[in-house]
Amino acid sequence: MPKISFHFLWYDFWIGCFYDRSKKILYICPLPMCVIKLDFLHDTKV
């Protein structure tokens, strides 16, 4: 399971998805300035 966090970033005025390959982070922006961050580098194994 990736670590999931929610952010309100006034400078991120976009809608869509961006995957940062080097950091293994998926950014999902469903509304301008509202960012959902999925960090796959901190995967927890059960």
Image: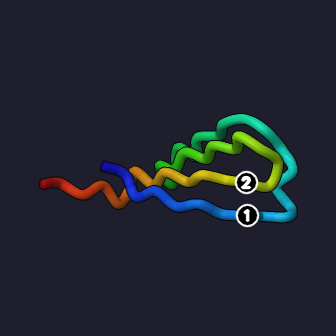
Question: Residue 27 got which mark?
Answer: none
Q: Residue at x 17, y 54 (%)?
A: 45
Q: Position of residue 4 (x, y in %)?
A: 46, 56
Mark 2: give few (<14), some (14-19) or many (20+) Cα within 10 Å.
some
For this orientation, the residue located farthest to the left is 46
Depth order, front residue of 14/19: 14
Above or below, 44 against 18 in this view is below
Which of the two discs, 2 and 1, labels the residue nearer the N terminus?
A: 1
Residue that label 2 marks: 34
Name the residue rendered at 53%, 43% in the picture.
21
Residue drawn 72% across the image and 35% down it = 16
Q: Is residue 38 left or right of residue 34?
A: left
Relative to 28, 14 lies left or right: right
Sort mark 1 into few (<14), some (14-19) or many (20+) by Cα contacts within 10 Å: few
- Give coordinates of residue 37: x percent, y percent: 56, 54
Q: Secondary structure at mark 2?
A: strand
Q: Quadrant of residue 6?
A: bottom right
Report the residue marked by disc 1.
Answer: 8
Say which amino acid is labelled 1.
Phe
Tell me the kind of residue under disc 2.
Cys
